[in-house]
Image: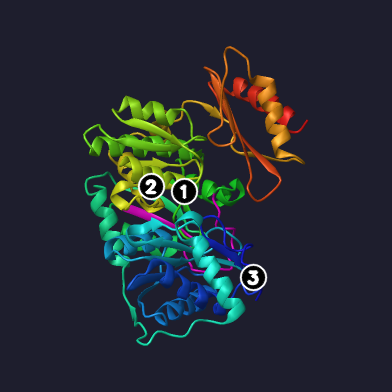
Amino acid sequence: MAADLSQIVKAYDVRGVVPDQWDETLAGLFGAAFAEVTGAAAIVVGHDMRPSSPGLSRAFARGAADRGVDVTEIGLCSTDQLYYASGALDLPGAMFTASHNPAQYNGIKLCRAGAAPVGQDTGLAQIRELAERWLAEGAPEPAARPGTLSSRETLRDYAAYLRSLVDLASIRPLKVVVDAGNGMGGHTVPSVFAGLPLTLVPMYFELDGTFPNHEANPLDPANLVGLQKRVPAEGADLGIAFDGDADRCFVVDEHGDAVSPSAITALVAARELARNGGKGTVIHNLITSRTVPEVVRENGGTPARTRVGHSFIKAEMARSGAIFGGEHSAHYYFKDFWNADTGMLAALHVLAALGGQEGPLSALVAQYDRYAGSGEINSTVADQSARLAAIRTAYEGRADVTLDDLDGLTVAAADWWFNVRPSNTEPLLRLNAEAKDEVTMTKVRDEALAIIRG
């Protein structure tokens, strides 16, 4: 195993192909390094259903225990279940998952006590440096008194905690199709939904990290097709899809039409503001729909705009004391969930909102879906900086247009806006455009793409 870990230690997590890029030996060194960097006396560790996850998770636990740390293993869990355990037990945590990546991948999402994220600037760089040194020089000597390994069941408490945050007892009966994509939603949904007035139609609840039916990545429209067909076929009220580690949720209405994550962000924001007396800050990243800040203001709240990425959302949540945050990638963050993201809690809010009134989901979300959006469009470019400069040249100086550089370049007018962001890992520019109607959006989108690809 090479001593340069730059290919697998990313900005916010560890992720790579097993065993080509990392293995149980390296997982053990990561466990020891995590113990060293956090200085914790105890940690909690969980894993998803991938074939390599149990072995990697146990190796990490043993590596930490060799440094004198007591390790609580919670076994199979979703990422937000691990965050629950970190928050409820007030322990640093490690979740073994590669989320929506293909089966040969695995990874680690790390957090400090209270589910506070660990990224490059908050410990991950030091963890990488220690693991690289130990790869080259040999692992450190075990502590004189090694830590213990113990098991703990958290699924029931996790489910009860989520249900305590959303009142579903009095909703009308609903029929919901859930596509777990053979991921961890198949483990958590039955417990969370147990006893609620819901008729559950499960799709691909069998835990299988080889993903035999489709990739567990609902952000790709191809992976939603089965759910979109099944919902109207079943006469269901809605459909919900989870990604591989079940920390993101995607929603389709009674017709099988996908509901924009921005609309879900706006809907949940309105509910969270109502729970907090019409007061509070709501975070949204800069590619969410303009609907989100509009709805926040209409419900008495204060919108706050951030860069794309969970580390920016979580940092701003903590700094501002925000009650909720949402991203267009279907990550939803809650103050009542230690500022961490949980797709399951967002799903419960959607069920409560739908079941609390008599209309269909399509009518309910229409008020939260006011504009025409392009979705994210990726373009391969030879020179990201040159293309961004070309866009700036084309639009700056126009009286009806504003430009800002919060994350890439955002160009905005009264009836439309678009953002172009460079990928950090590939020679791509990512375009998101939105306008008051489809005709205007198409014109704005095509003008921007012409410059990007020119």
Label 1 with label 2: CB-CB less than 8 Å: yes
Chief secondary structure of the magenta portion = loop
Mark 2 or mark 1, which is nearer the start of the sequence? Answer: 1
What residue is shown with label 3? Answer: 21
SS at badge 1: helix
Which element carries disc 3, helix, strand or loop? loop
Q: Residues within 10 Å of mark 1 (few under 14, many from 20)?
A: many
Measured as percent of width and height from the top left, residue 362 is found at 43, 34
Query: Could you tell me residue 307's position as x and y percent?
Result: 50, 39
Judge whether residue 182 can be spotted in this image.
no
> Which amino acid lies under the numbered mark 2 shown in the image of this protein?
Tyr
Q: Which of the pair 117/220 is nearer the observer?
A: 117
Q: Are marks 2 and 3 in contact (CB under 8 Å)?
A: no
Task: Decide: few, some or many residues near mark 2? Use Cα within 10 Å; few <14, some 14-19, many ≥20.
Answer: many
Where are the magenta residues, as a range? 198-218
Which residue was labeled with disc 2? 333
C-alpha gap between disc 2 and disc 3: 31 Å
Residue indicated by mark 1:
310
Q: Amino acid at mark 1?
A: His
Check whether the beta carbons of the residues at disc 1 and disc 3 lie within 8 A of each other: no
Asked if residue 429 lies left or right of residue 290, the reply is right
In front of the other: 431 or 164:
431
Which residue shows up at 59% across the image and 48% down it?
220
* Percent x, y of residue 146: 37, 85
Residue shown at the point (54%, 50%) measured from the top left: 218
The amino acid type found where label 3 is placed reads Gln
Provide the secondary structure element on which disc 2 rests.
Answer: strand
